Amino acid sequence: MQQMLDFYKSHYAKHEYHIAMRDGVKVYAQVYTPIAGEFADKGPYPILMTRTPYSCGNYDNATVQPRVTGDMEMLKSGYILVCEDVRGRWNSEGNWLEMTPPKDGKGIDESTDMYDTVDWLLKNVPGNNGRVGIMGISYPGFYTAASIIDGHPAIKAASPQAPMMNLWNGDDSYHGGAFMLGANHSFYAEGFAPQKNPLTVAPRERFAIPVKDAYEYYLGLGALKNTDTEAAGTNPLYHDQVVHDTYDAYWASRDMQLHMHGVKAAVMLVGGWFDAEDLTGPVNAFHAIDKLSPEAAADTLVEGPWVHGGWARGTGDSLGDIHFGSATSEFYQKNIEAPFFAHYLKDAAWTPLPKAYVFETGSNVWKKYDAWPPKQAAAKTIYFQAHGGLSWTAPTERASKDEYVSDPAHPVPYVGYVMGANPPQRYMDDDQRFAATRPDVLVYETEPLTEDVTVAGPVKPRLKIASTGTDADFDVKLIDVFPENFVYPEDAGPQARRAASASTVMMGGYQMLVRGEPFRAKFRNSASSPEAITPGKVTSVDFAMQDVNHTFLKGHRIMVQVQSSWFPLTDRNPQVFMDISKATNADYKKATETVFHQADAASGVELMVMPK
């Protein structure tokens, strides 16, 4: 870190500007211009910028440390770097809205602010080459995507990385209609709140979760509405997340998938297969740009074995107990990200990126495809069977089912250890053996595979269920079960081999979570108009989980677990059809859940299977 700071101090000059937008509001920007002759390129330089709600920092001082996403070696090659506080945050004037709704050319939004910023920079920052790139991770990823809608013609390259695209459907706030409790409450209560601008000094921490064990803490709070109180650290932003629990006008106006038109720049969407926050965003943005902006110079999807933003920090060689065989983050930075910006902003020679450049977990190899999902992947359903079986053959029994009691007073935890309020990223590929032993978790498993099975694309549970309640959650987990004699191979590296033999990490029989997702049954027919379950009636619950690219190796088993709580990753379902944001402690009821696997009511999971 000190080496990086010293480099920027000796090679860049820092400037601070307040740039007037078309409505007169002044937006704060820091501009870092190259001043030394040791850059690989001698100029003029392209502009590379990040727009953020999290503060550019270093206000009114000479400290030079650009808060621009990107590998240091790439930035050393020579760029004019810009960080901008978005409208209404930190040192920028104006009113700020959570995930600003696009106005589609009919008002002020993030696209017009970016357009005005770019126009000013090109005219007022000397030494630029007339080209602009933009990049950002997470919330700055959203601003990157929003900034290129009907974008300024000088924007030649954009990389929305882990962008928020639809908070209600698969990104930070709701998954399958279930509220992502731990991540959202800790994020808003402990720091992210409305501001009075301009603000240049970070406010003191508003609230801290008072116990180390999030399961204990949230269970003790009781009903969801008890988190939306002053005592629990609520603020207007968190309140909005809780009370807008259907896909209503609030969320629809913020659904970026509907607005990615007029994109002319080359776009590279980046995400991680184990991103616990914005796993859905990159894939949704990729498809939206393909559909609404066919004129874009490029539209590429890059997915690696990373957590949220993991490609920009750490080596990317492992997550928890699972190892990926190489430094995947370094590979991405040197072979994908740096060449992308260098080509579109500097005319550097390169090998064009494929439509999809994705890491295949399990086999631990990078793959290139001309479409995503790959055109050769075929939908194939793997079916639940009697006695915990799982196979590609549909069940033939006339009557076959499994039942369990779902008790909101004793919900299934999402990890097998004590965790804080903010979910640990490693849960995304964690061992699931702790859950498989519970009576309220159903387990279906194949025989050991006789050949590799690769799945690439969305995972789609197809359930036939019944409930004694009028609503229920069905959390489905796709799992890779390692052989009992498993050890990491020699080419996995010494760290992986040590982990495999360590007494604290027993990899034989490990149940690696490949993908897990909740679904609230009342949304089975509509995200906007929920419907109660008729108690005792056989009901179809079909939904789509996020994409995967994973190989179940020969000798491994494919497992599916089904449960009705995943706490406190998601809020508890009272199992009574109602507005859960208004539920009281007394509304949470036990219910018996039934999953059928018989000829006229077959349950399973549809996978996109690659040919052998």
Image (tube, rainbow, N blue to C red):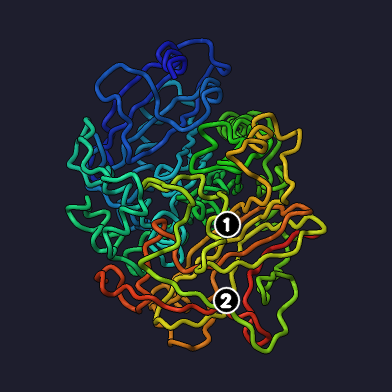
Instruction: Please say if 218 is above or below 14.
Output: below
Q: Position of residue 191 (x, y in %)?
A: 27, 42
**Can you say which quadrant of the picture contains the C terminus?**
bottom right
Q: Nearer the viewer, residue 45 or 87?
A: 87
Instruction: Please say if 67 is above or below 439.
Output: above
Q: Nearer the viewer, residue 378 or 255?
A: 378
Q: Is residue 343 left or right of residue 1?
A: right
**Label 1, on which residue?**
515
Q: Position of residue 340 (x, y in %)?
A: 60, 35
Q: At x 41% / y 31%, what residue is drawn?
A: 122
**Label 2, on which residue?**
463
The kind of residue tagged 2 is: Leu
Q: Dot 2: what SS?
A: strand
Q: Dot 1: what SS?
A: strand
Neighbours of disc 2 within 10 Å: few (<14), some (14-19), many (20+): many
Q: CA distance from mark 2 to mark 1?
A: 17 Å
Instruction: Please say if 233 is above or below 605.
Output: above
Q: Is residue 79 left or right of residue 529?
A: right
Give the mark, 2 or 1, whose residue is nearer the N terminus. 2
Q: At x 39% / y 65%, what residue is drawn?
A: 410
Q: Position of residue 323 (x, y in %)?
A: 64, 39
Q: Nearer the viewer, residue 519 or 12?
A: 519
Q: At x 33% / y 51%, what residue is drawn?
A: 109
The kind of residue tagged 1 is: Arg
Residue 150 in view here: no
Q: Is residue 349 left or right of residue 432?
A: right
Q: Which mark is residue 535?
A: none
Q: Position of residue 382 (x, y in %)?
A: 69, 70
Neighbours of disc 1 within 10 Å: few (<14), some (14-19), many (20+): many
Q: At x 53% / y 11%, what residue is drawn?
A: 38
Residue 40: quarter of image? top right
